[in-house]
Image: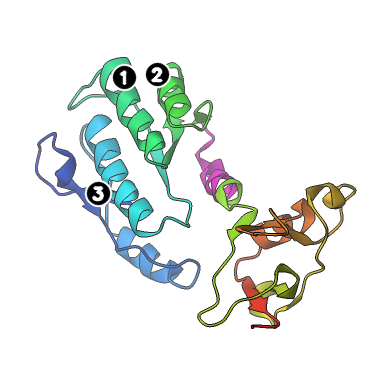
Amino acid sequence: MLFHGGINNCGAPNYQPALPMTAMPSQAQTIVSTLAPIQAAGASPWLPPIEGGLDFATALEVQFPAHEVIVVMPVDSQQSFCIASVSNEIVPEVAGGLTAGVKTYVIGINQAPMGQLDPIATAGGTGAAIDLTGNQLGQLSSNLSAIRDAEIPCTIPMPTPTTGSYAPDDVAFRYGPGGGMAVDVPRVTNSNACIGGAEGWYVDDPNNPTQIGLCPKTCGAIKVDTAPVLEVAFTCLQ
């Protein structure tokens, strides 16, 4: 989460992370303790924080290309500081982030102007903005969870063993629910074999696999697991 540095200017560098990137849920209390004394106040700029957020997120995307990196933009009112054109400045900014591989979600709360926020979310690759205006702020946590679940991919890049080579049939995918011991997930031939609610995993190309795909039932269980253990094992190296 980015916070204003206390200086009234409209530059994106004035918005810095309150915390470095940290794991959830193990560091949840650290995040809560850091955010607790911070009080929201003052005018409402849109462009500088979204620029700062996208700068931070695109740098992470470069650093961790195998991960999904997103920006979530909560808005509680009209722009009242650093006023920028939605169509000519903010939309191109989030569209550029999407081109760089970073989606932007927009959440309208309190008295946010939803009609102005929808084009921003569309340009950010996430459809319409999420409407939590009025008395719906209590739904913020569940909507953030839904965003997280939507962005957890159901594909995993095929890792490369540190030594030796392997045959595609000598790969195993294992899952341990809730931090428990990982056990083999059954392998199926392809995504069509997942139809009907089967559990399993498959590779994109049996001859030259680059990705592991998860059946929706298996992926769904992993998405709601707060501490999943995932392993890709090579059962026979040559």
| Front-most of residues 35 and 22 | 22
Residue 131, image x and y in percent?
A: 52, 29
Can residue 211 be seen in the rendering of this structure? yes
| Front-most of residues 235 and 196 | 235
Find the magenta span and give its range. Answer: 135-148
Residue 165, image x and y in percent?
A: 60, 77
The residue indicated by pointer 3 is 3
Q: Secondary structure at mark 1?
A: helix
How many other residues sit within 10 Å of disc 1, few (<14), some (14-19) or many (≥20)?
A: some
Q: Answer above or below: position of 115 versus 186.
A: above
How many other residues sit within 10 Å of disc 2, few (<14), some (14-19) or many (≥20)?
A: some
Q: Nearer the viewer, mark 2 or mark 1?
A: 1
Task: Locate the C terminus and report the quarter of the image it occupies.
Answer: bottom right
How many other residues sit within 10 Å of disc 3, few (<14), some (14-19) or many (≥20)?
A: some
The residue indicated by pointer 1 is 86
Q: Are marks 2 and 1 in contact (CB under 8 Å)?
A: yes
Q: Secondary structure at mark 3?
A: strand
The residue indicated by pointer 2 is 116
Q: Are marks 3 and 1 in contact (CB under 8 Å)?
A: no
